[in-house]
Image (cartoon, helix red, strand yellow):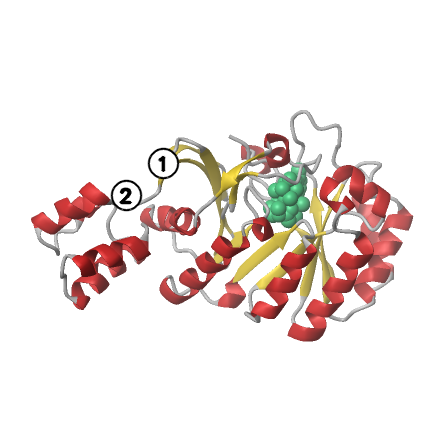
Amino acid sequence: MNVVKVIEYLLKIGEPKFRLNQILESYYLAKFKSFDEMTNISKDLRQKLSDNFNFLSVEEDGIVESKNSIKARLKLIDNLQIETVFLKYKEWNTVCVSTQVGCAMGCTFCATGQMGLKRNLTCEEIIDQIIYWKQKGVEVDRIVFMGMGEPFLNWLNVKKAIEEIHDNLKIGWRKMTVSTVGVINGIRDFTSWEKEVNLAISLHSLNQGIREKIMPSAKVHKLNELVKSCHRYTNQTKRLLFFEYALMDGVNDTDTDAQKLADLVNSNKLFFANIIKLNSVKNSKINPSKRTVQFCRILDSNRVKYSRRMSMGGEIKGACGQLIS
Ligand code: SAH
Ligand code: SF4
């Protein structure tokens, strides 16, 4: 729901403050799925609201379920489609949201990258992905901005959405994670924003040439500058920084690659690596590595702080990088 517009409208037609709160609360708590269902307000007002606004800016257009995850394809008002994933972990529920329709960054191992960018999502469309899951009865504990799109190329809307999620959906800053391909000015803005939201950097290689090949945006956002901005981030925020590293066969999985990653993570006590299993993507020549064990052995012998991230939803094409309509 476009909260700003709805508030403006309600004030214009002279509705009292408590009514505004009543309506907003119903929306944020996802008690109802439409204005029609809001029997706590007059029929006349319900009618006016549904004539003028969409209760939700996204509409379910298909879901695929697996044991611990559900992927939903959502249709936007202009008929474009995005995807959002619900991931059920032992101790919490995470929702993965999209920030753009498609993505302009063109990473060769990512399904979204093959679509190109259609457009940015509005703040309303970002939040409505979460309200959508809440309406289905999901208790949302954590949010990751790891769906379609590059959050820092739609930062104003993503930032507004995070603030609204914190203030009104009551999800703590520390329960949210923004993942970036490495947009350096975005990392700078994020650092000076000074919120305790987690930051993840999609690193995938410590070789400038290889990064350029698999992540074309690395031509602009150079590795040495990226690493500098990561140190600046931890120096200023004193918070952990996560490096995402998906192991790709013959691309970034040699012993030398592992040693480079070990050296980087060990260069700063706030650095942490997430070793991810690559999910196969149609039309991509890049395959999952067969050297995960050897790679991790080198990290272990260097006492690197890392985790092997559980990949969920791979079987429903709902895992990272497989979000494509
Ligand atoms: N654009 C942002 C956030 C969305 S992508 C970014 O790139 O960080 C979310 C994560 O999924 C990133 O870490 C990305 O590198 C990873 N990813 C993309 N394709 C993948 C694939 N095929 N297998 C595993 N992870 C993938
Ligand atoms: Fe875009 Fe992230 Fe996919 Fe790269 S990995 S194409 S930045 S969504």
Neighbours of disc 1 within 10 Å: few (<14), some (14-19), many (20+)? few
Q: Residue 77, labelled with which disc? A: 1
State whether residue 15 is above or below residue 321.
below
Q: Nearer the viewer, residue 51 or 134?
A: 51
Amino acid found under the numbered disc labelled 2? Asn
Q: CA distance from mark 1 to mark 2?
A: 9 Å
As helix, strand or loop, the secondary structure at mark 1 comes to loop
Specify whether tag 1 is near ligand 2 (CB below 8 Å).
Answer: no
* Residue that badge 2 annotates: 54
Task: Tally the marks.
Answer: 2
As helix, strand or loop, the secondary structure at mark 2 comes to loop
Mark 1 touches mark 2? (CB < 8 Å): yes
Residue most extreme to the top: 283
Q: Quadrant of residue 311?
A: top right
Neighbours of disc 2 within 10 Å: few (<14), some (14-19), many (20+)? some
Point 44% across, 49% down: residue: 126
Horizontal side of residue 270 vs 120, given as left or right: right
Horizontal side of residue 296 vs 23, given as left or right: right
Q: Residue 308, labelled with which disc? A: none
Q: Residue 84 in the image: state x and y as whole percent.
A: 47, 42
Horizontal side of residue 287 vs 46, given as left or right: right
